[in-house]
Image: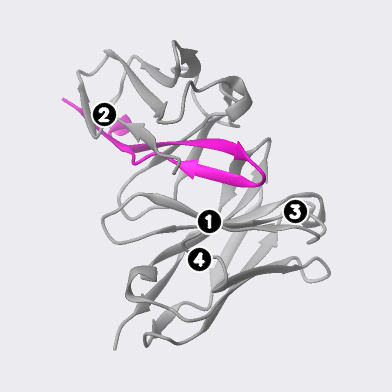
């Protein structure tokens, strides 16, 4: 069974930098998994931030960036702002039309 | 950016059926694959099903395979999710989303499905 793991929670100071990761139990995450990242605030629909590892979706500020770090996908927020406080989800494409989400990371900005 | 509006959610008894709809506008619907993603109360996102642009292929995780059916009517710019044999664990907000470069692109506002007696 494919399991995608994210840090359950993370904290960052305003103006600081934070890197959230997305790990795969069956091996290394690569660009072939087309990692994508989504931001969700309570009661709202998700918002697409990053697709294909490092491409920002339309209107997403450049303080959000995606990458592969070691064997994981990563989302880095540089210069965190108060309204970045949200849940963040990664998703990996596993082939054959199958997509798997990570469990999400709750980011606190304080 | 596209607009997606879900409808059809509500309260249904265990073992019952329900059909969700998703009306698309603002983009060329028949050029994009589409998906359904759900979120149980207080839980994370879960992929539920996907369909390619012409409806020729569909995909499901094991958790809903054989019970849910995704379909689309490109003449009406509408995506559907037919849900049968519903269980309490299917209770969730169901989002439709367009697909682009193996990712979810535009999202609807969601439709709540509650399975309870």
Q: Name the chain letter of the residue that bears numbered label 2.
A: A
Compared to B80, does A59 lie above or below?
A: above
Q: Which residue lies at the image location 22% right of the left edge and 32% below the top edge?
A: A9
> Are the two marked residues, 1 and 4, in contact with CB atoms closer than 8 angstroms?
yes
* Residue lying furthest left: A110
In the drawing, what numbered circle is on residue B64? 4
**In the rendered image, residues at marks 3 and 2 fall on the same chain:** no
Provide the residue span drawn in magenta.
A83-110
Q: Name the chain letter of the residue that bears numbered label 3.
A: B
Q: Which residue lies at the image location 52% right of the left edge and 80% below the top edge?
A: B84
Q: Which residue is mark 1?
A: B61
In the drawing, what numbered circle is on residue B52? 3
Compared to A98, does B116 lie above or below?
A: below
**In the rendered image, residues at marks 4 and 2 fall on the same chain:** no
**Pointer 1: residues within 10 angstroms few (<14), some, or many (20+)?**
some
**Pointer 3: residues within 10 angstroms few (<14), some, or many (20+)?**
some
Q: CA distance from mark 3 to mark 2?
A: 38 Å
> Are the two marked residues, 3 and 1, in contact with CB atoms closer than 8 angstroms?
no
């Amino acid at each position: 069974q494919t399991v995608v793991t994210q840090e359950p929670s993370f904290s960052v100071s305003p103006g600081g930098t934070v890197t959230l990761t997305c790990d795969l139990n069956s091996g290394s995450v690569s660009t072939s998994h087309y990692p994508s990242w989504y931001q969700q605030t309570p009661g709202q629909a998700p918002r697409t931030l990053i697709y294909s590892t490092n491409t920002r979706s339309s209107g997403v500020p450049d303080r959000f960036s995606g990458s592969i770090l070691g064997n994981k996908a990563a989302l880095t927020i540089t210069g965190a702002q108060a309204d970045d406080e949200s849940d963040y989800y990664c998703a990996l494409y596993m082939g054959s039309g199958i997509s798997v989400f990570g469990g999400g990371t709750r980011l606190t900005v304080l | 950016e596209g607009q997606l509006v879900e409808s059809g959610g509500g309260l249904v008894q265990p073992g019952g059926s329900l059909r969700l709809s998703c009306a698309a506008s603002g983009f060329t619907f028949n050029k994009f694959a589409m998906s359904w993603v759900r979120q149980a109360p207080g839980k994370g996102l879960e992929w539920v099903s996907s369909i390619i642009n012409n409806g020729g292929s569909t995909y499901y995780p094991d958790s809903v395979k054989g019970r849910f059916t995704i379909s689309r009517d490109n003449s009406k710019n509408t995506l559907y999710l037919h849900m049968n044999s519903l269980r309490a664990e299917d209770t969730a907000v169901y989002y439709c989303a367009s697909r682009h470069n193996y990712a979810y692109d535009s999202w609807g506002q969601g439709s709540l499905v509650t399975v309870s007696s």
